Amino acid sequence: MIVPGEAASIHEAARLLATGDIVAFPTETVYALGADAANADAVAKIFAAKDRPHFNPLISHAADIGLLRTEVLFDDRAELLAAHFWPGPLTLVLNKHPLARGARITNAGLPSISVRIPAHPVALVMLEEFARIGSGLVAAPSANRSNMLSPTTAQHVAESLGRRVPFILDGGRTCIGVESTIIDLTGEIARVLRPGGLALERIEALIGPCARVAPGDKPIAPGMLARHYAPKKPMRLNATHATDDEAFLLFGPATANLGGRLRLNLSESGDTVEAAANLFDHLHRLELTDVAAIAVMPIPDIGLGVAINDRLRRGATP
Ligand code: TXA
Ligand code: MG
């Protein structure tokens, strides 16, 4: 059931979390499927609803950094990044605090826990209310079936998960449109586990260069598996024209007719921030058409283009 993200339904969502139920809610990146991170039975419901493998750890969300301080150990780099970018599209993987309340299943028994404060008013009010009546910690992956496209509207959640999620808070279309950037700070060298809604350039300006995980490296985050975020149709990347059976996903000013049975533009002005916001939404729309395949124009590998290209590559992997 999709319910409007108003005071009464946000209150109901917090109550459901406190009683061990799962709820879908908007964040600024993508829609989330949440449960009380401190309640192992509740967290297990997330894995069941998504068909998610149990070895894949979840991000713990809270409205207040104070709650996260007893889950994970913040070093100077983490403090700096949190002060600049939270609430916002950044997830930090940090060493687990000895008194962490998060259930073992939340972080898949790892010595680290990933944490984030989302920047969506509906999410923040829900998390604040849940902190008054429960742990205030919400374990949440994106609210889609495992390996499928991430949801940027409440309707996407309903299409992907159906009756597996009885309660979907509607907060409109998400503004960032791709998942958070994940930085691993458990070791001396900061590592990018997933490029996302916060440009790496902005992170490196504060804490210096971060190591990139090279293609072919052993996956550290299961979200780094080669195939992920995939539409139900084959995708062809770096296309300069499209055939009559293909839809063409464009980027930048569309001048000449470059083919394709139908065309959607990620950003006519060539803005990677706008393109990220449109990415999953356009792919969802193309999934519902009867075109055989999707051709995608090259996207520059700077700013949020890095996250867009990462999702496109994984989505195009057979
Ligand atoms: O924007 C986002 O990050 C969204 C919204 C809902 O917050 N969440 C999200 O969660 O994308 P999910 O579960 O779809 O992706 C999180 C990724 C997974 O690939 C998971 O393996 C990785 O983060 N991850 C979580 N905890 C980790 C940890 N302790 N160490 C390494 N990787 C971790
Ligand atoms: Mg996901």
Image (tube, rainbow, N blue to C red):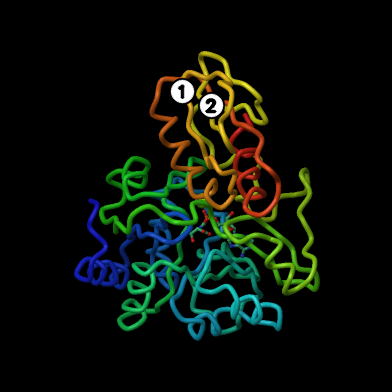
| Residue 179: x %, y % from top left | 53, 55
Q: Which residue is mark 1?
A: 262
Q: Residues within 10 Å of mark 2 (few under 14, many from 20)?
A: many
- Asked whether 106 or 139 is in front, the reply is 139
- Asked whether 223 or 77 is in front, the reply is 77
| Residue 157: x %, y % from top left | 36, 47
Q: Residues within 10 Å of mark 1 (few under 14, many from 20)?
A: some
Q: Which residue is mark 2?
A: 248
Residue in view at x 74 percent, y 63 percent: 191
Which element is circle 1 on?
strand
Does residue 100 lie above or below 2 as drawn? below
| Residue 4: x %, y % from top left | 23, 59
Quarter of the figure that contains the C terminus: top right
- Asked whether 224 or 78 is in front, the reply is 78
* Labelled pair 1, 2 in contact (Cβ < 8 Å): yes
| Residue 137: x %, y % from top left | 44, 74
Does residue 250 lie above or below 164 as drawn? above
Does residue 65 lie above or below 256 as drawn? below
Q: Quadrant of residue 100?
A: bottom right
Does residue 297 lie above or below 14 as drawn? above
Q: Quadrant of residue 240?
A: top right
Residue in view at x 46 percent, y 23 percent: 262
The amino acid at mark 2 is: Phe
